[in-house]
Image (cartoon, rainbow, N blue to C red):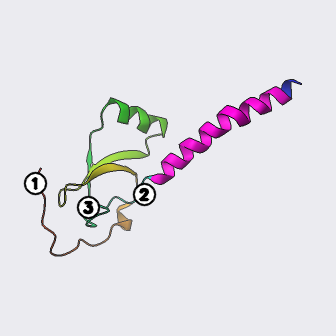
């Protein structure tokens, strides 16, 4: 009887929570390049909520900023080998 209740609790709450966290993690891009212009992005310091989220994900999330087009967002930590060459003709954005 106890096993039945534990299985129900896991499926009803913990399993769904783990699945939701995994899906949210996979939504973020794994590349360190900008989605808009393929330029290299720079890490930016996150606020309190962002640091808590990053610690919850074992430090695998980073807030990044593109100096070329001004894009800012959260990405998974990726390798620089995955970076593409910069697109010619795109102007840098001052911040």
3D distance between C-alphas at marks 1 and 3? 15 Å
Q: Which residues are magenta?
A: 4-27
- Of badges 1 and 2, nearer the viewer stands 1
At 49% from the left edge and 48% from the top edge, which residue is drawn? 25
3D distance between C-alphas at marks 1 and 2? 25 Å
Q: Label 2: how many residues lie within 10 Å, few (<14), some (14-19) or many (20+)? A: some
Residue 85 place in picture, x, y as percent:
27, 73
Look at the image and say whether residue 52 sits in the magenta stretch.
no
At 44% from the left edge and 46% from the top edge, which residue is drawn? 60
- Of badges 1 and 3, nearer the viewer stands 1
User: Label 3 near label 1: C-beta < 8 Å?
Assistant: no
Q: What is the secondary structure assignment of the residue under circle 1? A: loop
Q: Label 1: how many residues lie within 10 Å, few (<14), some (14-19) or many (20+)? A: few
Q: Quadrant of residue 78?
A: bottom left
Q: Name the main secondary structure of what is drawn in magenta.
A: helix
Q: Looking at this rendering, what residue extends furthest in the right direction?
A: 1
Residue 42 place in picture, x, y as percent:
25, 52
Q: Which residue does the numbered mark 1 point to in the structure image?
A: 94
3D distance between C-alphas at marks 2 and 3? 13 Å
Q: What is the secondary structure assignment of the residue under circle 3? A: loop
Q: Looking at this rendering, what residue extends furthest in the left direction?
A: 94
Asked whether 85 or 12 is in front, the reply is 12
Q: Which residue does the numbered mark 3 point to in the structure image?
A: 40
Q: What is the secondary structure assignment of the residue under circle 2? A: loop
Q: Which residue does the numbered mark 2 point to in the structure image?
A: 30
Q: Label 3: how many residues lie within 10 Å, few (<14), some (14-19) or many (20+)? A: many
Residue 40 place in picture, x, y as percent:
26, 61
First reached walking from the N terminus: tag 2 or tag 3: 2
Q: Is residue 19 left or right of residue 95?
A: right
Q: Is residue 12 left or right of residue 84?
A: right
First reached walking from the N terminus: tag 1 or tag 2: 2
At 25% from the left edge and 66% from the top edge, which residue is drawn? 37
């Amino acid at each position: 009887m106890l096993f039945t209740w534990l299985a129900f609790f896991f499926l009803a709450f913990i399993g769904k929570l783990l699945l939701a966290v995994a899906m949210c993690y996979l939504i973020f891009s794994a590349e360190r390049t900008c989605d808009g212009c393929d330029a290299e992005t720079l890490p930016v310091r996150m606020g309190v909520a962002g640091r808590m989220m990053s610690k919850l994900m074992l430090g695998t999330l980073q807030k990044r900023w593109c100096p070329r087009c001004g894009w800012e967002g959260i990405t998974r930590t990726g390798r620089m080998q995955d970076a593409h060459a910069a697109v010619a003709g795109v102007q840098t954005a001052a911040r």
